[in-house]
Image (tube, coloured by chain):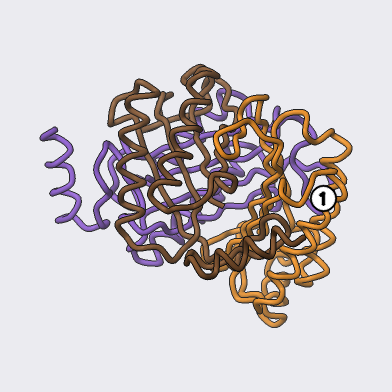
Chain colours: A brown, B purple, C orange
Amino acid sequence: VPIYEVIATHGTLSPEVKAEIARAITTIHAQETGAPGHFIHVYFPELPGGSLFTAGEQSSTVIVRALVRAGRPDQVREAILKRTSDMLQEVADVSAMETLVTVIDVPPSWAIEAGILLPEPTKEAEDAWFAEVSGR
Amino acid sequence: VPIYEVIATHGTLSPEVKAEIARAITTIHAQETGAPGHFIHVYFPELPGGSLFTAGEQSSTVIVRALVRAGRPDQVREAILKRTSDMLQEVADVSAMETLVTVIDVPPSWAIEAGILLPEPTKEAEDAWFAEVSGR
Amino acid sequence: VPIYEVIATHGTLSPEVKAEIARAITTIHAQETGAPGHFIHVYFPELPGGSLFTAGEQSSTVIVRALVRAGRPDQVREAILKRTSDMLQEVADVSAMETLVTVIDVPPSWAIEAGILLPEPTKEAEDAWFAEVSGR
């Protein structure tokens, strides 16, 4: 965690653009939260043409749906939302109206990574967690 | 937002049925919530044959997983759930046992669309939001 | 509900391994919660090569994202998380660092299955629910 799912119909995002979006999301999330890159995941499910609709019509909207650890200040989420929305418009070359980003909290104890339940997003808890992961 | 994800294995839903489901979901959501169609998104991720299991066996269940803005009365969600379940049985030609619909609340401030954080689902907040979007 | 989404890039999991993961998840969830298999769904969305990134680089992480009914004790979720993480390492042959599992609560009244709103996860409510489903 975090997990960023980027939803766009086939052909909207080239392989190069997908890689660029993945790098940009990783940078934004790491800068705003201080989280290490190794736990930032971004994926693009396959949507064949004719599999994405807005207002009942086929559309080329780009939707980002993220799960992040709960417990951070509101302004961290707001910064991630705004920067990700701006980034999509630039990198994916879509209009503001064709972007949608949602960042959803998950309590850390609801997730396990590297085989160990996730820590709260505080420096102390994270340091203890990394020590435990490294010691394995 | 809303975002409706419709999950079915390849071949369960033809392109025509996908389009019909997308239109029907858009109509149901707009009627029950008053939301304008332009912000109603429906997508169908690709699942190759052998990628969906119920009780550990391959199945043709149709699952709808929606994210909607929090803040509406319970009976709005209940109406969406029941109408969507009924619609799937009719349009996708599956039995009640092969349908599953879940509608999950997301606080409006956890999402950004058209570049602006979403408003609460009240007429006043939405009018102000649309004025800001239009003014861009 | 539950709905388990298993996210891995094309080629990471063979069809046989997908079927084995689906059976294993079904067994773990049924044993830990007492839920009947018929309502346990597992699916694997298609992710072409180059569609999954960790730390901004293509990766072979296997991510499980589950929606379950809220209302169970914490130790049920913890057992599901740990057993699912261990199972992935064994069945999918990935390292602990390449596994991520998150199990997210959904209030039962936010979902409809077999055409009837889901019951709370108590024996009494579930018995009444099954009686209603069977009576249809």
- The image position of residue C63, as x and y in percent, is 67, 47
- Circle 1 residue: C89
**Residue type, mark 1 in image:** Gln
Please say if A11 is above or below A34. above
- The image position of residue C105, as x and y in percent, is 57, 65
Residue C106 appearing in the image: no
Mark 1 crowd level (few <14, some 14–19, many ≥20, 10 Å Cα): some
Q: Quadrant of residue C85?
A: bottom right
Q: Farthest residue to the bottom: give it.
A: C124
**Residue in front for this viewpoint, B10 or A90:** A90
- The image position of residue B136, as x and y in percent, is 14, 32
Q: Is residue C55 left or right of residue B35?
A: right
Identify the residue shown where x is 42% and y is 53%.
A33
- The image position of residue B14, as x and y in percent, is 62, 25
Say which quadrant the C terminus of chain C sits in: bottom right
Please say if A74 is above or below B56. below
Say which quadrant the N terminus of chain C sits in: bottom right
